Every structure is written in structure tokens, then in C-alpha cells.
Image (cartoon, rainbow, N blue to C red):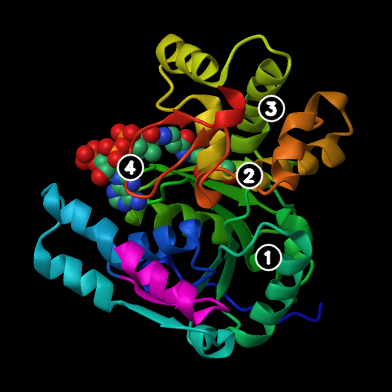
């Protein structure tokens, strides 16, 4: 086999971690690795986005310090461990592990993995934080499919304990064991899953969110009522509509389309209301409006005017 692969490092030897993409997930992943002592290269196409990501990380670390979870020196040391840049080649040349957290788009990820395979050392493990795109498919863009794996963090990354570890069809069990061990070192709880549409998390979560949107669309109940039922009745920390806004309605739609295409069953078809909201650019927290209207700096949860 023509392959660039060589033996992956043991988790104890993983020191240099490259995080690709500095959005909500990427900056959270960088924060967690840096807090746990890893040297992090955070890379993105946009320099202003990197600046914004660093101030988000600094603010989130300040929250942890304020709550007594970290001292000032450890906070400063964690920040100093993160180096930002816009060159993929520079960011990956000595990586032991790459965690890709770019846009949830199949073509973008395939092209990125083709480049990551060319640029990173042969022993480097290539992980993706994709929420639903096939790991086997992504691995197929590289010459090292045995070293490609899903490392699916949950939002907000510094808070949520779970990491869903998705094994592609060709993922080497040694690589899986390495990433499981590494997740423990990050203070997370890894759960292994096989590579089928939506894996475990989104195969179960997205139909619930879609059903909540149908419940609203059909006029069974309003936004606040649907969320209150699930918060108070099922002890969910957020109702499904607020959670959809938090994840991003465009991301929810993209994941539902992967489920619908992958299983070919009508039950996964995205609700027309979700499709319309995404077309209108109302994507949730990140655009300031989804099922709720958001104001910077305010924690008040106001139902968006069109649903009042
Ligand atoms: N960095 C560090 N700490 C953070 C943080 C961040 N980015 N965001 C929140 N926190 C901390 C807060 O400081 C606070 O800490 P203490 O408990 O020590 O006080 C704690 O988290 C709770 O935060 P808040 O008090 O601000 O707010 P909250 O109690 O309402 O909790 C929440 C917020 C943790 C987000 C909670 O509402 C929740 O668990 N929501 C559900 C989240 C969820 O389901 N995530 C998964 C989404 S699906 C996904 O990500 C995968 C996918 O593929 C779509």
C-alpha cells in the first residue's frame, strides 16, 4: 500500500497539537489542550478571527480563575501555550496530533485532510471534530486512513465531559486507544462509536430537535412552552429550541441532511420551518436571532418576535 503512515505516538508522547479552525468549537478545543499542558498551534484562514478566538479563550479562562478552578499563573501559562497563525504548513510541521474543527462541509473537510496529510509528519494522527460527516470518507482523502479518527467534542468544550470517539472503517485500534487515553488526560470521558450517519450523539439529538421544531411549526405549543416542557419535565439543561440556537440552526440542518441522505428515511427530513429559518439567515446565537432573540452581554432569554 502506498501510504505515508508510520507508527502513531503513544498518548504520553503527544505534545504538539494543532487545532484547525478557531470558531466556537476550535477555540474551546485549543483552551482545553492548553490548560492540560499541551503546546497548541491554533490555525485559521482569518487573522481577525484568530484575534477574536484568543480574547474568547482569555475571557473563558478568567471565568475559571474567578471560580477558583485555576490560579493566575496557570491561566497565563495556558494562554502562552497557544500560538496562532494562518499558515497550515507552519502550524502542522511538528504536530503529533491535528484536531480539525473547520466548517461542517464535506468538500472543505476532504480538501483540508488532503493538505493535512501532505503537510504533517507521517506519525501524526489526524482527528476531526465533525458532528456527522463520515470519518471513513474523510480518511479516504489521505494516504493514512488508519491514522484518521473522529474526536467529537461537545459545546461548550471546556464544560462538557463527553468526547465521542468515532472509528472509521480503517482506523487502527492503536490509534483509537491513543485517542481514548488522551481524552482521559484532558479530563474528558471518551465514548467509542462506529462510523454511521450522526454517530451516536447527533443520531439521537437531532431527531429530538427536529421534532421540537415540528411541534412549533404545527402550532402544538410556543417556543417557551416547548422548551419549558423539556427543561422541567425531562431535566434537560436547555430546551431543544434553545439548544438548536446554541448549536447553530445551519449546523442542525446540515446534520439532519446527513442523516436523511445516509438512512433515506422520511423521519430524518428537516422540518420546513428549520429550512426557512436557515435560508433567512436566522441561525441562532451566532447571528443574534433564531427561536430566541439575543443581545450581547445579556443572559435574558427572549422569544424572537415572529414566535411571540
Ligand atoms: N469556558 C469555561 N467555562 C464555561 C464556559 C466556557 N466556554 N461556558 C460556561 N462555562 C461554565 C460557567 O463558568 C459555569 O461554571 P460553574 O458551574 O463553575 O459556575 C458553568 O459552565 C455553567 O455556566 P453558566 O452558569 O453560564 O450557565 P448555565 O448554568 O446555564 O450552563 C450550559 C450553561 C453549560 C451551556 C448548560 O446550559 C448546558 O449544559 N446546556 C446544554 C449544552 C449541550 O447540550 N451541549 C451539547 C450540544 S451538541 C454538540 O455540541 C455537538 C454537536 O455535534 C451539535
Q: Nearest the camera: 133 or 26?
A: 26
Residue positioned 54% across, 69% down in the render: 21
**Residue with the mark numbered 3:** 210
Q: Tell me how far mark 4 sits from mark 1, CA to CA.
A: 46 Å
**Residue with the mark numbered 4:** 298
Q: Which badge, 3 or 4, comes first in the chain's sequence? A: 3
* Mark 1 or mark 2, whichever is nearer to me: 2
Q: Nearest the camera: 146 or 218?
A: 218
Please say whether residue 16 is visible from this viewpoint: no
Image region (quadrant) for ligand 1: top left
Residue positioned 64% across, 79% down in the render: 116
* Mark 2 or mark 3, whichever is nearer to me: 2
* Mark 3 or mark 1, whichever is nearer to me: 3
Percent coordinates x, y for residue 151 in the rendering = 54, 54
Dot 1 alpha-carbon crowd within 10 angstroms: few under 14, some 14 to 19, many 20 or more: many
Please say if 161 is above or below 304: below
Residue positioned 76% across, 38% down in the render: 276
**Residue with the mark numbered 1:** 146
Amino acid at each position: 500500500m502506498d501510504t505515508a503512515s508510520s507508527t502513531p505516538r503513544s498518548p504520553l508522547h503527544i505534545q504538539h497539537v494543532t487545532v484547525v479552525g478557531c470558531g466556537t468549537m476550535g477555540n474551546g478545543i485549543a483552551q482545553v489542550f492548553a490548560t492540560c499542558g499541551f503546546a497548541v498551534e491554533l490555525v485559521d484562514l482569518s487573522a481577525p478571527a484568530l484575534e477574536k478566538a484568543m480574547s474568547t479563550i482569555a475571557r473563558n479562562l478568567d471565568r475559571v480563575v474567578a471560580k477558583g478552578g485555576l490560579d493566575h499563573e496557570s491561566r497565563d501559562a495556558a494562554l502562552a501555550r497557544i500560538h496562532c497563525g494562518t499558515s497550515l504548513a507552519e502550524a502542522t510541521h511538528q504536530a503529533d496530533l491535528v484536531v480539525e474543527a473547520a466548517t461542517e462541509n464535506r468538500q472543505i473537510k476532504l480538501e483540508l485532510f488532503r493538505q493535512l496529510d501532505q503537510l504533517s509528519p507521517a506519525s501524526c494522527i489526524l482527528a476531526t471534530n465533525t458532528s456527522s460527516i463520515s470519518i471513513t470518507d474523510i480518511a479516504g482523502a489521505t494516504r493514512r486512513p488508519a491514522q484518521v479518527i473522529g474526536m467529537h467534542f461537545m459545546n461548550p468544550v471546556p464544560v462538557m465531559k463527553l468526547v465521542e470517539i468515532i472509528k472509521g472503517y480503517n482506523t487502527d485500534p492503536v490509534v483509537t486507544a491513543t485517542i481514548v487515553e488522551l481524552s482521559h488526560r484532558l479530563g474528558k470521558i471518551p465514548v467509542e462509536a462506529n462510523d454511521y450517519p450522526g454517530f451516536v450523539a447527533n443520531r439521537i439529538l437531532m431527531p429530538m430537535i427536529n421534532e421540537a421544531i415540528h411541534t412549533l411549526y404545527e402550532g402544538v405549543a410556543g417556543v417557551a412552552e416547548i422548551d419549558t416542557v423539556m427543561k422541567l419535565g425531562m431535566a434537560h439543561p436547555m430546551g431543544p429550541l434553545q439548544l438548536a440556537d446554541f448549536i447553530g440552526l445551519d449546523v442542525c440542518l446540515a446534520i439532519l441532511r446527513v442523516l436523511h441522505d445516509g438512512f433515506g428515511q422520511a423521519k430524518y427530513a428537516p422540518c420546513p420551518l428549520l429550512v426557512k429559518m436557515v435560508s433567512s439567515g436566522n441561525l441562532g446565537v451566532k447571528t443574534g436571532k433564531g427561536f430566541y432573540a439575543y443581545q450581547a452581554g445579556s443572559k435574558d432569554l427572549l422569544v424572537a418576535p415572529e414566535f411571540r
